[in-house]
Amino acid sequence: MGLFRSEREFLNAAASGDTETVSAYLSKSKKWLKAQDDDGSQAIHLAARNGHTSIVTLLANAGASLQAHNQENWATPLLEATKGGHTNLVKYLLENENVRSVSTAPHGTTPLQAAIIHERYDILQMFIDAKKVDLTAGDPPAIYCAVINDRPAALEMLLAAGADPNVMRKREVPDRSDEFFGYSYTTRTKTVINSPLQAAATKNSTVMLEMLLKAGAQKLKDEHPLHSFAAHGNIAAATLLLEYGIVKIGDKNDTYQSALHVASEKNQPEMARFLLAQGIDKDMPDKERRTALSYAQQFAMREMIELLQGPLPKRETLPVKKIEAPAPIIEQKPTPAAVVPAAQPIVITTPPGSPKDVEVWTLTGAHSVAHITVMPVLNKKLTELFNFESRERVTFSENLATKSELMGPHQSFDAISDDALLKAFSEYTRLGGKADEDKVFKHTIAKTQLKKPAGM
């Protein structure tokens, strides 16, 4: 097929990064900018999807809109670049004044949500630093999005950036459906409002619950996070809720069930024992006048029946934590994108002309450790950042003469060598870091192969 005659050839060139072909097409006519793929994506979307910054720049200079969206999911070039983790392209787009849709979109996913969902934490930090993001916008808003997608690392970054831990998600859901002549339809909807704290309870996440509580999160009046955690038997989370005074031990849901009813129904005897030790009334009736024992007897749960019929456990009183007011947010100059927002810049100096390499391990956040090697002979500094929360390693290479820095792709722990991972975990724990070994080494190293670092 001849050149300048095929929209498909032009789109393929943009998708593959063929600058020469794209330039040749545009030199003949700008009409190719309106060419569309099957899903309505234009050349600028395809180039952004594959991280071709030079092609996106070329197309933008020729008149392509950086705000253009496709027809299928309303994706913009920024959304495509974010989903693909193309940090250099994201940086270029953010520096363009015409790019505004970071946290809002008429339809579909926003770039901010995509950074959270796809765990593009370096890009999420770029969004925060760019000051173009509204952390309360979108459906769901950023905090809520991080919680419902089980992204504690993103939640930590957002809270550190000053996001409101009580931002609510409001949505319309069907309230009543009718059926006529075999066809069903919704006749009425209702507005449902949920808090991030209840969302964390629904996800059964103790980690995210504690983050939210420390940031001052509260539940809504008609929400019952204690019941949610009781269903999962999550005593640690239930303890946090009681210590922070978010719930009371005898709280009931809309059917008058206590948390003990739920624990009994879901056969969680340890949770039931914990609730009884906190003074919950085991004879409290629900809306149908049934007690927790009634549920246990209905499902023939022997251990639960014996617990509820036996003597009460020794009473325990939990201390109530004092919730401190959040510290004022001090605006800081944007810092280079990093996987862990709490990380501080690390400076290693070597004597001029020193032929020896310098190697350092240091904690860079609650969930990460950095391995830094300075090589004076090569005029180079190499930094490996291991994040034990997201199970990723990212590498930074810096030219000590020019101060230019290149960031490598994110690598799953499953893709790196056993020796490298074991060494990183050993240094992390030696320095005081704590992480769940089962999660760190899943799919990589059998638990029986692990050796505890010296002194542990």
Image: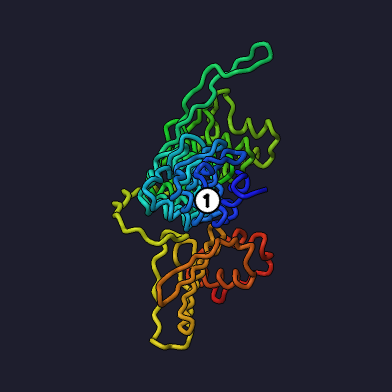
Residue at 62 percent of width and 44 percent of height: 6
Residue 35 can be seen in this image: yes
Residue at 49 percent of width and 61 percent of height: 367
Percent position (x, y) of residue 317? 44, 47
Residue at 59 percent of width and 27 percent of height: 290
Report the front residue among 123 and 145.
123
Percent position (x, y) of residue 128? 39, 51
Amino acid carrying mark 1 in the image: Ala
Residue 236 can be seen in this image: no
Report the front residue among 299 and 21.
21
Q: How crowded is the residue under tag 1: few (<14 C-alpha within 10 Å), some, or many (20+)?
A: many
Q: Residue furthest top?
A: 181
Locate residue 309: give its quadrant: top right
Percent position (x, y) of residue 186? 57, 19
Percent position (x, y) of residue 66? 45, 45
- Say which quadrant the C terminus sits in: bottom right
Residue on which the image places disc 1: 48
Question: Height in image: 108 above or below 172?
Answer: below
Is 30 left, or right, of 182 in this rendering? left
Under circle 1, the secondary element is helix
